Amino acid sequence: MKLDAMALFAVVANEGSFTAAARVCGLPKSTLSQRIAELESQLGMRLLQRTTRRLSLTAAGQAYLVHCQAMLEAAEAAEAAISRLRDAPSGRLRITAPEASGTLLLPALLAAFALRYPAVQVECLITDAQLDLVAERIDLALRTGQLADSSFVSRKVGAVGRVLVAAPGYLAAKGWPQQPAELARHQLLLHTVLPQWPLQQDGEVTLVDASHAGLRANNLNTLRQLALAGAGIALLPRFMVRPDLASGSLQHLLPAFPVPENHYYAVYPSRSHRPAALTALLDFIDEYGLAALLA
């Protein structure tokens, strides 16, 4: 009871009046005044000076208030600690991601996430297929490009930078293209879902027909390996070829005609009743800096 009275006294002191404090506490003003009077009686000290116009703290009240506020802060800290324990991320998360980012970027991210949240079990399905989140019991899908309309929640977590690349040996034999139209006479390495390559100049996007490509694959790493082998020109995510560009194993083509970025989304079934583990992973994706790695 005394602890309750200490909390009420702190509210009265902070509000500066019984009327305002009664509103905050949801108590009748008379009840609040009586509780403070009882506290003063127990302490054997007057804490407040009451007049018809104002309320002020006595010297004893000022000293007592410091300890009452410390008690309230300790109580809030205790509640926060219990809340963290109650809502601590745990359980199983089933996620899916495209092959390129899922193979090259996610392992380090998930390893760091597992160190912070050891009670969370993550099952990762790496595939370029658009899995059915409900049928496959997917908690989180990482997806690129244009999203289909759905009732799912989507949140942009980054954008994938893309570049045209080719090996020095190929360029020595076939020449460097200087304009998008020159790609028509080159050997192109085509992803099966992208028959046209978008290139920008002065804010305008030009679609280059790549359907004449002699080599095709539904896997970006296969296209990268073909490009490294000198088989032609490929359109690939920058994060995938960043080491190759740095070493000179691949060359960046047509930099004056950049390829628009591909948006990268986190997609999950519902905004309400979101598991603590999923919230923790979404926050960790931002904290880890996935957006910078994708660029």
Image (cartoon, rainbow, N blue to C red):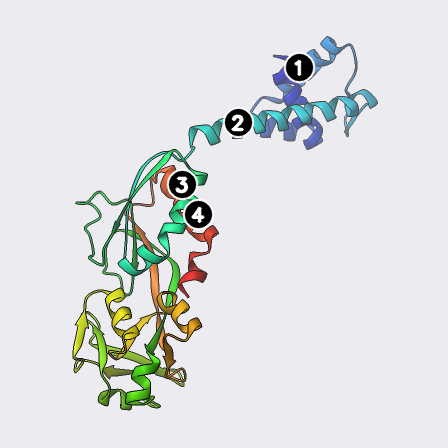
- Tag 2 residue: 79
* Relative image position of residue 232 (x, y in whole percent): 25, 80
Q: Earlier in the sequence, mark 4 or mark 1?
A: 1
Q: Residues within 10 Å of mark 1 (few under 14, many from 20)?
A: few
Residue 280 against residue 211 in the figure, above or below: above
Q: Which one is in front in this view, the residue at disc 3 or the one at disc 2?
A: 3
Q: Earlier in the sequence, mark 3 or mark 2?
A: 2
- Which label is found at residue 34? 1
Kindly report the distance in space between the C-alpha atoms of the residues bearing marks 3 and 2: 26 Å
Residue 13 figure quarter:
top right
Q: Residues within 10 Å of mark 4 (few under 14, many from 20)?
A: some
Q: Amino acid at mark 3?
A: Ala
Q: Amino acid at mark 4?
A: Phe
* Relative image position of residue 201 (x, y in whole percent): 38, 85
- Tag 4 residue: 284
**Circle 3 SS class:** helix
Q: Which one is in front in this view, the residue at disc 1 or the one at disc 2?
A: 2
* Relative image position of residue 129 (x, y in whole percent): 19, 57
Residue 99 against residue 206 in the figure, above or below: above
Q: Amino acid at mark 1?
A: Gln
Whether residue 51 is visible to the viewer of this picture, yes or no, is: no
Q: Residues within 10 Å of mark 3 (few under 14, many from 20)?
A: some
Kindly report the distance in space between the C-alpha atoms of the residues bearing marks 3 and 4: 11 Å
Q: Amino acid at mark 2?
A: Glu
Q: Earlier in the sequence, mark 3 or mark 4?
A: 3
Q: Which one is in front in this view, the residue at disc 4 or the one at disc 2?
A: 4
Kindly report the distance in space between the C-alpha atoms of the residues bearing marks 1 and 3: 54 Å
